[in-house]
Image (tube, rainbow, N blue to C red):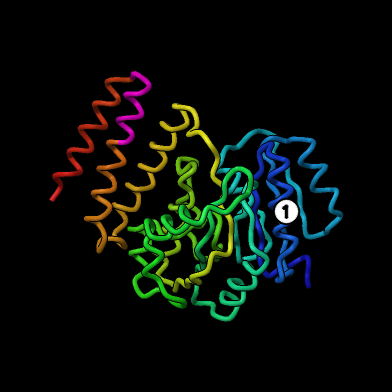
Amino acid sequence: MDYLSPAVSIITPAYKRVDYLAEAIKSALDQTFSDFELVVCDDSAEPKIEALCRSYEDPRIIYRANEQRLGIAMNNYRGFQTARSDLLTKLDDDDRWTPNFLEKLVPVMLSNSEICLAFSDHWLIDSEGNRMLEASEEQTTKFGRHFLNYGLVKQPKLLISHKSIPLASSAVFRKSAIDWSTYSEKVGGAYDLFLSSCLVSSGMEVFYVPERLTEYRLHSGSGTSNRRLQNSLETLWVSEKIYTNTYFQDIASDYRNICSYNSKITGNAYLHERQLISALLYYIQAIKYHFIA
């Protein structure tokens, strides 16, 4: 194992959730594939998070605190750009991996340089860490993963239509396959869909493992109305980037409908904030998308 050039870099953005972070780190350290670095990017500069990371005394764990809060998109970006490996994977501070996640995906990437992305299915867990079987199966179906077989994906563009790639929790991807000049803080929490579209549009291969190898945690509550508005704007921004990307012209009709829907959702969010003019403008935009030939 070469700590200066690990096979894969794990990026863990952190923000205050020390107890959950301890579970996430443990799941990384329990991996059967051990040639990695774990980069914890602390956007809260929380002393307890630094203390937790130092307590393991493991040279694979790298703690980095931001001098100023960067937000979701740019905290992730900092982690991606400072990673020492070309192979990247995300482990959020409240999620967990099964012990063989890296073992199942990283060797696939190492054995074929034409693969830019390998991903798996995942469990949904509640705030207490209990697996939610029915909800997990519903997610698999909702995002079209039940149609996918083990191996190379035959029509990777459809992964973007169905939002099949859980890049934030269950994927390994190549940093060099992404044009990072297109990345913007505007992607916000929709960075995973944006990066997935960048990887697919590279024209390289995509590989799928139909096993639930990670655990994605759901939290009670739906966040503040302001956060919901921001999420809507971020998702719409990314959807419009995909819609105008000529590589995805085969699925343009799908994304036209998605842009229409996301415009309506953004209008709803503005209406909830009592910003009536903004709401009206997004409703009009939704209608325009709906009638584009």
Q: Nearer the viewer, residue 250 or 170?
A: 170
Q: Please say whether residue 67 is one of the residues in the magenta stretch.
A: no
Residue at the disc numbered 1:
25
Q: Position of residue 66 (x, y in %)?
A: 69, 39
Taking the spot 57% from the left edge, 43% from the top edge, the residue there is 74
Q: Nearer the viewer, residue 48 or 245?
A: 48
Dominant SS in magenta: helix
Total number of numbered discs in the rendering: 1
The answer to whether residue 58 is left or right of residue 267 is right
Q: Position of residue 191 (x, y in %)?
A: 48, 48
Taking the spot 71% from the left edge, 50% from the top edge, the residue there is 23
Taking the spot 24% from the left edge, 28% from the top edge, the residue there is 281
Graded by Cα atoms within 10 Å as few (under 14), some (14 to 19) or many (20 or more), the crowding at tag 1 reads many
The amino acid type of the residue labelled 1 equals Ile
Region in magenta: 265-274
Q: Nearer the viewer, residue 140 or 264?
A: 140
Q: Please say whether residue 270 is one of the residues in the magenta stretch.
A: yes
Q: Position of residue 207 (x, y in %)?
A: 47, 73
34 above or below 169?
Answer: below
The answer to whether residue 17 is left or right of residue 249 is right
